[in-house]
Amino acid sequence: MTDAPAPEDVALPDGLVRRDFGGGETLATEGPVVGPEATDGDWRAWDASRSKLAATYAAGLDPGLSADATVLYLGAAAGTTVSHVADVAGPTYAVEFAPRPVRDLCRVADDRDRLFPLLADARKPESYAHVVETDCDLLVQDVATRGQAEVALRNRQFLADDGRLALAIKARSEDVTGDPTDVFDAVLDDLRDGYEVLETASLEPYHDDHLAVVARPR
């Protein structure tokens, strides 16, 4: 793993701030409330223990989120993290495979005209290629499946040449019995078939056996 800077040294895009909601500083965005979360006026706390992407910032990495960026988010679930992304970014395509969380995701999107839910399988990008814009600025991947590198490689087609991949590798989803360090190394080796790995960091203590990866297409 690379040595990451302190979290407070990571520059934040417009629309994303550090704010104290009474328990110390945390990331925050402005937007409609989604579920139980700390708020201060229109500001919503972005809890690193509930979001791999927020934990990536807490680990000192810059995942590449920027104001008005076009984002493809794989593994959007019920929409907690992607709601914060859409509060900051431009068009945000949210792919989720399971119908039940997609219903919640659609409700989140009702209040956000830049968020586009897609009931689809991230392992089959051809099923949404007719909807998602090419030259996306950021690909966020948070999927619980084997072959996580392969998912990122299949979806590389949507990224701009100077785009970024922000990937949370889940060791137990890849190999439930394997040593997490060995699992991470194997996934990174596969990922390098189509990406240059820029930074990595453990997501402990927020998420056990997870590795944050920031990469760019090659």
Image (cartoon, rainbow, N blue to C red):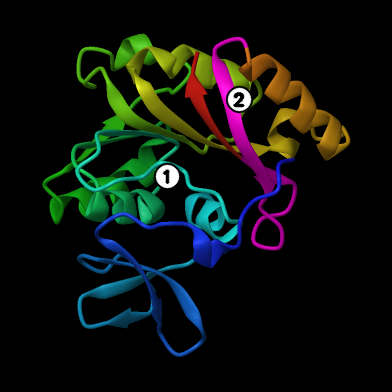
Question: Crowdedness of circle 1 by 10 Å Cα count: few (<14), some, many (20+)?
Answer: many
> Residue 14 at x, y = what percent?
25, 57
Picture residue at 38% right of the left edge, 15% below the top: 125
Picture residue at 66% right of the left edge, 24% below the top: 146
- Magenta stretch: includes residue 195: yes
Please tell me whether residue 59 is drawn above or below residue 196 in the rendered image: below
Picture residue at 61% right of the left edge, 38% below the top: 199
Please tell me whether residue 38 is drawn above or below residue 190 in the rendered image: below
Q: Is residue 173 visible?
A: yes
Q: Is residue 124 visible?
A: no
Q: Nearer the viewer, residue 91 or 123?
A: 91
> Residue 101 at x, y = what percent?
38, 46
- Mark 2, residue position: 148
The part of the chain drawn in magenta is 193-212
User: Real-space Cα distance between discs 1 and 2?
Assistant: 16 Å
Element at label 2: helix
Decide if residue 183 is on the left or right side of residue 28: right
Circle nearer the viewer, 1 or 2:
2
Q: Nearer the viewer, residue 103 or 45?
A: 45
Decide if residue 92 is on the left or right side of residue 157: left
- Mark 1, residue position: 77
